[in-house]
Structures are given as C-alpha cells and as structure tokens.
Image (cartoon, rainbow, N blue to C red):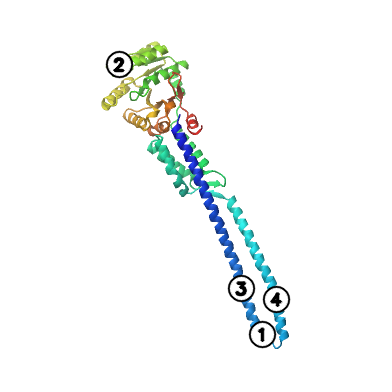
Amino acid sequence: MFKFLKEKLKSFKKKIEEIEKKEEKEERVAKVEKVEKVEESAVGVAKAEVAEKVAERRKAEVEEAKVAKVEVKKAEVEEKEAKAEKPEKGKLASKIKGKIGFKEKVSTLILKREIIIDEKKLDDILPELEMILLESDVAFEVVEEISRMLRERLVGRRKKIGEKLADIVIDELKAIIKEILDRNKFDFDEYLDRLVAERKPVNIIFVGVNGTGKTTTIAKLAKRLMDRGYSVVLAAGDTFRAGAIEQLEEHAKRLGVRLIKHKAGADPAAVIYDAIVHAESKGIDVVLADTAGRMHTKKNLIDQLEKIKRVTEPDMTIFVDESIAGNDAVERARMFHEAVGIDGSILTKLDADPKGGTAISVSYVTGKPVLFVGVGQGYDDLVKFDSDWLIKRIFED
C-alpha cells in the first residue's frame, strides 16, 4: 500500500539531509574564515599601534640628541629606550593572546546558537516535494495548500544545531495532511445510530461510474450494518445494466438479505421507492440503493440521479470510486458533487494503490468526508476511514 509515495518521500528526506550537511559544512568554513579575518584585522591594529609609538620614540630621540651635550647623556637616553622596549613587546604578546581567545569564543558561539529556517532554504526543497505529491495523484490545489502551509509554519522557525531539517519538514507534512483529512471529519456510525433512533428506514443511495466497485461496496456496507445489528434491504437501482441487477442479486443471496428489483430498463426511482415502501412495511432499518454510472451519457445520468433524489429523498448520497484511479477519481467526485451533491465518499481498492493521493485529495476537493475505504475482496474488507490510520501507512515502513 502506497509503495510509490513511501519510496519518493524517503528519497526526498535523504536529499534534504544531504543538502543540509553540505550547507552546514559550507557555513562552518565561511564562519571560520570570517573569524580568522577578524583576528588578522585585530592583530594588524595592534601592530599599527606599536609602530606609531616606536615612531614617536624615535622622534624624541632625535630631539634629545640635539639637546644632549655629552656622550653620557646619550647613553642614558639609550638605556631608557632599551627599558621601554620590553613592556611594548609584552603588550603586543598580550594583545595577540587576547585575540586567540576571542576566536575560540566566537567558534563556541557559532556551534551553540540556533539556525533560523529562511525562505531560500525552503525554495531548495519544496519544489521537489510538490512534484512528488503531484506524481502521487495529489490534486493540484491540495499540493498548493500543503506547500503554503509548510512555508507558513517553517519560515522563521528556529532549528537547533544537530536537529535535522528533514525530520522537521516530514513531521510538519504529516501534521498538515492530517489537518486536511480531518477538516471534514464525520462519524458515519454515530450519524446512522441517531437517524435510525429517530425514524426508519434510513435511505442511502450510492453514485459513481461503472466498474469502480460500487455494487460490491454496497454489499460490504450491508454486511457491516448487519454485524452491528441493523436490518437491511437492497435496491437494484442500476436498471441500465442487467448485469448490475444480477450482481447485486448474487450478493443479496450470499448475505441473506432481500433485494428489490424491477426489469432491466425500468425507472430506477420507482425501484428505490418500492424498496423504501417495503422497508417501512417490514420495519427494516436501512435501504441501500445502487444507481447507474454510465459516463458517456452524462446529461441523462445526472437527470436520472436528480429524479431519484427528488422522488426518494435520500438521507445520504455516497460517492464510490477506486483509489487507484488517482486524479480521475478526484475529478469524478467533483463532478458528481457539483451535479447532484454528495455527502461522503468511499474509496475502493486502497490496498492496491501505490500512491495514496486520491485519499488525500477527494475530501479536500469535495468538502465532504471519506467514510470508508476498501482494502480487499471480502465482505469484511471495508475499513472505517481514519486519518491516523492513513498517515501511518504512508509514512511508516
């Protein structure tokens, strides 16, 4: 699961570490060179001060020589000069020694201080992360949002020496993805419990294109609801394909639930309405209704779905598509939501998805939650969606 995205993120983390090591090495060299220049400059100042005093002394000697009358006086002057040279040399040595101590202090300060993450550092790494996310089927607007949030949180942030920038970036990436996934958080079980307690049957219709696992998902959810103590009836609302009716009928037999069906080509709104009437008469809790999903006649499909919603007044409209479809699934979710309105999504075949971008994107694009994910072929292979569950499988080995 998510093998492609995992490998790309590992490579991205490794590259950040390599860039950081290179920058740290260059920074250390530059700072040491700067310290050495400061030291050389300080020593030069000290030498200039000594030279100036020596020149003054020589001038004094000339003046004294003019005034001197005897050689003895000259000798005394020379003796005084000799005595004066020793402290001057001592002062020079003391100053040089002081400058070496200063270099050590600066070096220690450099090694202990914090580093501020700047815009340039992020410019070196974020474009590659954006490309990784796009290649992993994360929708463009979601990539933009992730990049914006990373910049907002990281620019100006202080990083201690020894703390890895790669770890900081990945940790923030995890947190941002979780926030995006949790923006439309919704508990399907709590919602259904409340609805059934108020009135029944609860009517749930499923929309989506053909061949994405919609009919099988209906059967999986029926099994899950039955395991939780609910009674269920299925409605074969995809009357466009005789095969869809037969497929749902086979699932109903296996699960031991009633299927309401009409002949192929019948009015799907009438089929679902009959299922609701049946559920009311028998005290059944939930109606799960299939619908057609042919995309080559989009207008007719949308008109049909609008009629179904108008006639049957569903409590929930759930979009179903396969995770491996990537951006195609995201765009279909957007289209169905804009055309008829959806209340949530179920993504199938997540166990076969090497990228994971669909799961990250579909909730953001539609503004509606991902309710469940399919992770296998069995009736029990329907997992309630959880952001922590998804992030763990993306970022952990």
- Residue labelled with disc 1: 65
Residue at 61% in and 77% down: 55
Q: Is residue 261 left or right of residue 82?
A: left
Residue at 67% in and 65% down: 94
Whether pointer 4 and pointer 2 mark residues with C-beta atoms closer than 8 Å, the reply is: no
**First-in-chain label (1 vs 2):** 1
**First-in-chain label (3 vs 2):** 3
Q: CA distance from mark 1 to mark 3?
A: 21 Å
> Which quarter of the figure has residue 240?
top left
Q: CA distance from mark 4 to mark 1?
A: 16 Å
7 vs 46, nearest the viewer:
7
- Residue 51's disc is 3
**First-in-chain label (4 vs 1):** 1
Q: Amino acid at mark 3?
A: Ala
- Residue 298's disc is none
Residue at 63% in and 79% down: 58
* Mark nearer the viewer, 1 or 2: 1
- Residue labelled with disc 2: 242
Residue 352 at x, y percent in the picture: 42, 27
